Structures are given as structure tokens and as C-alpha cells.
């Protein structure tokens, strides 16, 4: 399974349903894509049992913010904020509510950029979701927040590859986020069958990377995080870089003019989970909006073919690399629809 990069630039994305007539054929194709993806990212190790420590709890006007740390694979620790909404009495909830794993964009502050009122404009989606009544877990990604390697800047991944030269940050993030889902499922005020994930940019593509591997994710919202190889003028951003490296093998593959997949195929691993994507035509980070739109159309065809076309929403706006208020409102309503909404969980 390999695609010529020049053909992708000329002809566009590989169509997911090309040559597919039966559900069995489709399932076999997705099995192959999954195997290729797992091999490429270096595999997902077995997770460790849930262990966490609450470092502090701070009462906010409409929720309680926990500062905690929990275990991940290979003796790693993940720092996070757990945002717990209040019930009608003004106290932290006790009965199960839907929960969201909120993944932050590329930012030195990590979790704090999306959980605190001091966060960047249009990035405080974790804070807004707890204000809406959801339990929200916002972890620091490795290389950000409290997980920056000693003596390094934020989003510098070299120490990771020194320790794990055959692995990838993509797989590390996936397993870290699965450990976060484990934590959410372990607390009695979370409805374990109603967990979604949301993210912008770096956090955006990590949402569907996670959903493709973890069936416990029941709804996905990705903002400005979709970037196919097809018609991308700088696909090397997925490969080896001085700061943050996602998939080292991409660099060598691009040097040979081939790639083993395109990202519409990786996003399709999440189907038929409800999926909302927003991308901007004025996005200077992922500017190839035509092939992004083509990918979204292809994904919609898959959802429709699977009989769940209503579960897929794609918005391609004229905006920049941002998560504007009107799109966030749609995202929250999307979660209300597919996770039952906080008021339906008690």
C-alpha cells in the first residue's frame, strides 16, 4: 500500500470507496489501513492501570478545577486539569455526566491555554465546555505545559526520540490520551459511555488519531487539524524537523516520492463515530483547502454509504487558522446531540 506523491498532487486524495462494493471489502480495506498506520507510528503499547494523584482543587465560579497527575506507559506522568461542573446546588456533581477529553494546540502553556480564563482568545474550549455542564479532562501533551523536557523549549521532541528511536510522538500521544480516557472512565461522576474529544490544530488531528484507535470515543470535533498529503506544498511538516517531529519515516518516504497512506484514510478509522471538522480557507498553516474539502467530501461519502451520513459534519469557512465563536457553538451543540448533553445524563 503506497501512493506516488506526484500522483496525489495531480489527481488528489485516494478515494476510500474506490473499487469497494460490499461492506466486507470495506472492512478489509480499513483493516489494512489500520495495520499500515500502526506499523508506521510504531504501535500502541499496553496501557498501565489507572493511577492518579490530585495535587490541588480550586473552586471557580461555576466549576471545580483539579490539578492532577496520572500514570502513562514507560513510567511517564501526565499533568492535567480536570474540570468538574457544579450541580443545581452549587456543589461539584456526583451523578454521571458526559465528559470531553480536550486537547490543546501548539502552545507553551499546554492545558492552561484551554482551561483558564487567561487562555488565548478562541482557545478556551475546555473552560466553555465545563460551563456548559460537561466534565472535561485537559492533559498536557508531551513537550508542552508541565511536560517540557528539562533544558528544552516547548514542542522540542528530540529527547523523546533519543529514548525511543523506533517509536513516534504520534503513537505516544495516542496512548497518553487513551490513558486519559481510562481515567475518565474510572471516576463515578463520568458517564463512561458518553465521552467525546475536541481539539484545535495540533489538538485537532490528535482527536481523530485517538478516535480511530479507541472505540470509547463517541464524538469527535477537530478544528484546523486536517492536513492531507495530496496537494500539500510542504508535506515535510509531518516528518523530521528541528523542533517537533511527528512521523520520522515520512522524510525518507517523501525523498523517494511515496507515502503509505493519506489522512482521509486515517480519519476514516474513526467511522462511524460522529465527526465534525472545521477548516479555514485562509489558514496559512494548512493552506491546501481544496484537498481538505475533497477529503471531507470523501469521508462524508463513507459515512453516508455506512448509513450514518447524519453523523458527519464538515465546515470549510473563509476564516484563518482559528476556532471562532460560531464554530465552537456548533461544536458544543454537536456534542449535545451525540453525547446526550449534560442534562440528559443524570
Image (cartoon, rainbow, N blue to C red):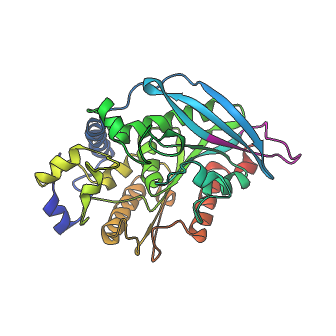
Q: Which residues are magenta?
A: 81-96
Magenta stretch: includes residue 82: yes
Q: Closest to the observer: 257 or 239?
A: 239
In this rendering, the answer to whether 117 lies above or below 180 is below
Q: Position of residue 244 (x, y in %)?
A: 35, 48
For the view shown, which residue lies furthest in the right direction?
89
In this rendering, the answer to whether 108 lies above or below 40 is below
Q: Closest to the observer: 209 or 339?
A: 209
Specify whether 331 is left or right of 296.
right
Asked which quadrant contains residue 227, the reply is bottom left
Specify whether 212 is left or right of 122.
left
Q: Position of residue 103 (x, y in %)?
A: 52, 49
Q: Closest to the observer: 136 or 13?
A: 136
Residue at screen point 26% across, 64% down: 232
Q: Position of residue 148 (x, y in %)?
A: 47, 41
Report the magenta stretch's main SS. loop
Asked which quadrant contains residue 321, the reply is bottom left
Q: Position of residue 145 (x, y in %)?
A: 53, 45
Is residue 257 visible in the rendered image? The answer is yes
- How many labels, in total? 0
Q: Quadrant of the N terminus?
A: top left
Amino acid at each position: 500500500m503506497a501512493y506516488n506523491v506526484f500522483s496525489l498532487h495531480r489527481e488528489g486524495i485516494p478515494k476510500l470507496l474506490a473499487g469497494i462494493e460490499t461492506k466486507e471489502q470495506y472492512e478489509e480495506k480499513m483493516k489494512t489501513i489500520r495495520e499500515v498506520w500502526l506499523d508506521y507510528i510504531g504501535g500502541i503499547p499496553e496501557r498501565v492501570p489507572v493511577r492518579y494523584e490530585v495535587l490541588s482543587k480550586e473552586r471557580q465560579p461555576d466549576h471545580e478545577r483539579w490539578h492532577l497527575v496520572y500514570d502513562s506507559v514507560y513510567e511517564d506522568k501526565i499533568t492535567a486539569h480536570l474540570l468538574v461542573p457544579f450541580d443545581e446546588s452549587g456543589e461539584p456533581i456526583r451523578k454521571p455526566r458526559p465528559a470531553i477529553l480536550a486537547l490543546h494546540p501548539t502552545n507553551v502553556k499546554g492545558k492552561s491555554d484551554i482551561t483558564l480564563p487567561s487562555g488565548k482568545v478562541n482557545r478556551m474550549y475546555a473552560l466553555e465546555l465545563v460551563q456548559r455542564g460537561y466534565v472535561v479532562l485537559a492533559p498536557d501533551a508531551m513537550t508542552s505545559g508541565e511536560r517540557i523536557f528539562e533544558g528544552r523549549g516547548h514542542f522540542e521532541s528530540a529527547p523523546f526520540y533519543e529514548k525511543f528511536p523506533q517509536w513516534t510522538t504520534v503513537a505516544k500521544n495516542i496512548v497518553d490520551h487513551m490513558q486519559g480516557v481510562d481515567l475518565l472512565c474510572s471516576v463515578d461522576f463520568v458517564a463512561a459511555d458518553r465521552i467525546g474529544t475536541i481539539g484545535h490544530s495540533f489538538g485537532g488531528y490528535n482527536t481523530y488519531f485517538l478516535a480511530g484507535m479507541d472505540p470509547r470515543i463517541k464524538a469527535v470535533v477537530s478544528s484546523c487539524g486536517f492536513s492531507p498529503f495530496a496537494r500539500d506544498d510542504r508535506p515535510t511538516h509531518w516528518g523530521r524537523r528541528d523542533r517537533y517531529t511527528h512521523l520520522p519515516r515520512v522524510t525518507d518516504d517523501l525523498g523517494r516520492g511515496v507515502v503509505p497512506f493519506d489522512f482521509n484514510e486515517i480519519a476514516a478509522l474513526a467511522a462511524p463515530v460522529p465527526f465534525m471538522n472545521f477548516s479555514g480557507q485562509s489558514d496559512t498553516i494548512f493552506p491546501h483547502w481544496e484537498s481538505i474539502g475533497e477529503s471531507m467530501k470523501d469521508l462524508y461519502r463513507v459515512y453516508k454509504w455506512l448509513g450514518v451520513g447524519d453523523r458527519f459534519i464538515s465546515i470549510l469557512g473563509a476564516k484563518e487558522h482559528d476556532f471562532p465563536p460560531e464554530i465552537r457553538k456548533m461544536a458544543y451543540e454537536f456534542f449535545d446531540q451525540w453525547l446526550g448533553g449534560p442534562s440528559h445524563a443524570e
